[in-house]
Amino acid sequence: MTNLRVYVLIFAIASVYTTQLWAQKIEIGAGLGAMNYKGDISPDLQIGTAKLGGNLFFRYNLKKDLSFRASALMGSIAGDDKNSSDPFNQQRGKNFSTTINELSLTAEYNFFNYQYHRYHKDWSPYVFGGVGFMKFSPRDNPTADYKQNQIVLPFGVGIKYNIKGPWDLNLEFGTRKTFTDYLDNLGGNDPTLPKTQQNDYSKGDMYYYTSLTLSFKFIKIYCPPN
């Protein structure tokens, strides 16, 4: 009878632990951040032109060091030649504002065994990368017949921190590699334009998103019977 009680106790503890692990696989979150752009009107990343962005995500924690995430990002980017240190840009005097909506699927690798459990780290740096789809809409009428629906490649770094129980904070910086030169509504090689209105069409535009998010893990709390 004593051995049976020990086995039952071990099984009960293992069941609770396993249930918690499976429950922690599902996570949802939301956050706010700043969106920046790099391209013809802003050849260098300009912090002062940042615009507000917001994101929602669903994360599936496959293992302690590997997660998969589906995200939605909404926001805008902007730029102004007057803020550039390049005399060519200053003379050209172009500016723009573009809204961006993005859906993406990414994989995350945690450097530490990050998990809600007293024997694991309560914080971890991580890297992520994947593929996404974005739709962008310039404020001004399009200057050319270009596609506003594009594939993007999101990648970046971040830090996860467990606040308490199922609540986590994520600080993240991500880059989006695009395959268009028209995020700023300025692109292509048009020899009919004066030199002061042309751009470096050999380079594609990119945008960045720095965010602070709050997430919630679905953790089951074991309540022993009375």
Image (cartoon, rainbow, N blue to C red):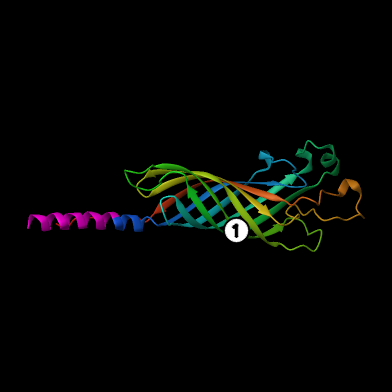
Residue found farthest to the front: 3
The quarter of the picture where the N terminus appears is bottom left
Q: Left or right: 55 with respect to 22?
A: right
Crowd around label 1: few <14 · some 14–19 · many ≥20 (10 Å):
some
**Which amino acid does the dot numbered 1 rest on?**
Val
| Residue 156 inside the magenta-drawn segment | no
- Residue 42 in picture, x, y percent from top left: 74, 43
Asked which quadrant contains residue 179, the reply is: bottom right
Residue located 71% across and 62% down the image: 148
Query: For this rendering, which residue is in front, 174 or 148?
Result: 174
- Residue 16 in picture, x, y percent from top left: 26, 56
Residue found farthest to the left: 1
Q: Left or right: 129 with respect to 10?
A: right
Q: In this picture, which residue range is highlighted in magenta?
A: 1-17
The quarter of the picture where the C terminus appears is bottom left
Residue located 66% across and 52% down the image: 177
Which residue does the numbered mark 1 point to in the structure image? 131
- Residue 180 in picture, x, y percent from top left: 73, 57
Query: For this rendering, which residue is in front, 38 or 118?
Result: 118
Q: Left or right: 185 with respect to 207?
A: right
Residue located 40% across and 44% down the image: 162
Predominant SS along the magenta part: helix
Is residue 220 in view? Answer: no
| Residue 4 inside the magenta-drawn segment | yes
